Image (spheres, coloured by chain):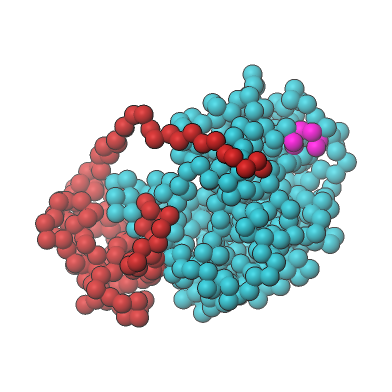
Chain colours: A red, B cyan
Amino acid sequence: MSEEKVIVANKGLVRADFAFWVGQYLDKFYDGLENKKIMGNKCPKCGDVFVPPRKICGQCNVVIPLEENWVDLPDTGILKNFTITPYRINDRSSRKAKDWIIGIVQIDGSNTSIIYRLLNMEPKDVKIGMKVKIEWNENTKGDPSDIKGFIKV
Amino acid sequence: MQKVGIVGYYQVKLYSDANYGRYEMIFEASRGALDKAGLKKKDISTVISCTNDYYDGRTISNCFTVEVGGGYMADESKVEMDGAHAVLYGLMRVLSGNHNLALVWGGSMASCYPYHSARLYETDPTWERPLAYVNDITSAGFQMRAYMEKYGVTVEDIAKVAVKNKKNAAKNPLALKEAQLPNLTVKDVLDSGIYSDPVTELMAAPPCDSVAALLLAPEKQALKITDRPVWIKGVGYSQEPYYLGDRDLSGCKSMNLAGKMAYAGAGIKDPSSEIDVAELFEACAHEELIFAEELGFAKKGKGAEINSAINGDLPINPSGGALGGHPPCGTGLIRIIEAVKQLTGEAGQYQVKGAKKAVASGQIGMCAQNNILYVLEAN
């Protein structure tokens, strides 16, 4: 290949932000988060409890009615898996000095898991199967950031 | 299934930063496949392309590739997944009985865009995307840990896959130069820097630039074009739930189901003895072991015990696999081409002796959410 490469960079001439409507199920879930409460919903056929809640159970291919099958869940759970990374997705070009520990947590009483940072923990403290608890953001906004992460119980 | 033959192929060499416009690369691949088969543009009756709007930085990205991709005033459509999925579409077009020659091409130039940032756009914008904890980097870490924890597999077992594939890549002139590492050791892989623990840099397929192309023809036509077509004997595909938190990452059920479907089509009863070589799209080293187990080459958790070297019992990724370079949208298609080369005896330094039956896989999504498998056979 030749030594000099001519590059045209496209910085984007238009700005087109998307506004996604979260839908009725996540709307209710985010209302719960704003009040520091976790709500799941239960498939009427297989009984699986989903966090976040959803309209369709993929396995059973049935609708979970919006008016029913809501389950109040605690803010505790079990750590199912974790990874430790020095990268942030939007800046993979440079490693950060501080690692993030990111965990997959199954909220007690649910059958699915959610992914958040594990806080106030050293890598050596992290064990699969350990009990963890939500660290809420002080000022909740009704969005995914209301859960700051999980801490050791 | 009616017989459909692979009658030509071409792969552009993998570059980490190719000095090509993408059009030149697409033309080199599609024209190269035609030339190799001794065919002309007018012989193509349908074109299936595989690109991705995000990766190409433009919407409906195939509308820009009409002239270079063989689609000029022709029947053309795009599959926005892996190139191996585009082959399925091409296969269906040929099986419809309406087409005598399908050109399938796929690939992209990862040097032109932030690949890992673009992968974030796979996540749910209303749930996981705003916090950006779930991406191809962290999900690979989860998948590797889940597999190791469940079966007691060690990091060394997984590093050995990277060593094997990077050594194999050194024998493949079309592999990525940076991935051709004939003297790599397990220690080098483990010391190569944490990517997302326990995955290290050298365990992950390096995104790069390339385009590959493949030609498909129905049986009669295939035999007119070449005396050594490779036959597609079976194909299977399946996919897992969307949210990572809904999945069991210690295995890959969708690959298991894809394998069963493909084996049923091809009449394969005992894959580990009947298959001579496998080219599997491993986005990370551990996926090669998970896939090998799900495809019946070893018991669950015992993938590392397979002698999968080029001269081993069941060679896996003799070309170097995706660890030898991963041009998004082209990688699964290249696995098929590499399996074809093995069956036609064109694999040079990494030829598996006497290979008659092969499998090749493609994937798309976090932790191989969607998998596709082909069983191929020499004429």
Identify which residue, B16 or A134, lies in the foreground. Answer: B16
Residue B338 drawn above or below residue B9: below
Residue B190 drawn above or below residue B166: below
Which quadrant would residue A92 be assigned to in this image?
bottom left
* Residue depicted at x 38% and y 53%: A91
In the rendered structure, the answer to whether residue B28 lies left or right of residue B76 reads: right
Residue A79 in the image: x percent, y percent?
Answer: 32, 72
* Residue depicted at x 78% and y 26%: B40
Identify which residue, B131 or B43, lies in the foreground. Answer: B131
Residue A93 in the image: x percent, y percent?
Answer: 43, 55
Which quadrant would residue A145 be assigned to in this image?
bottom left
Total tally of numbered discs in the picture? 0
Does residue B144 show up? no
Please check the rendered image and state whether residue B252 is part of the magenta-colored stretch, yes or no.
Answer: no
- Magenta residues? B32-37
* Residue depicted at x 73% and y 41%: B10
In the rendered structure, the answer to whether residue B318 lies left or right of residue A47 reads: right
Which quadrant would residue A59 be assigned to in this image?
bottom left
Residue extending farthest to the top is B73
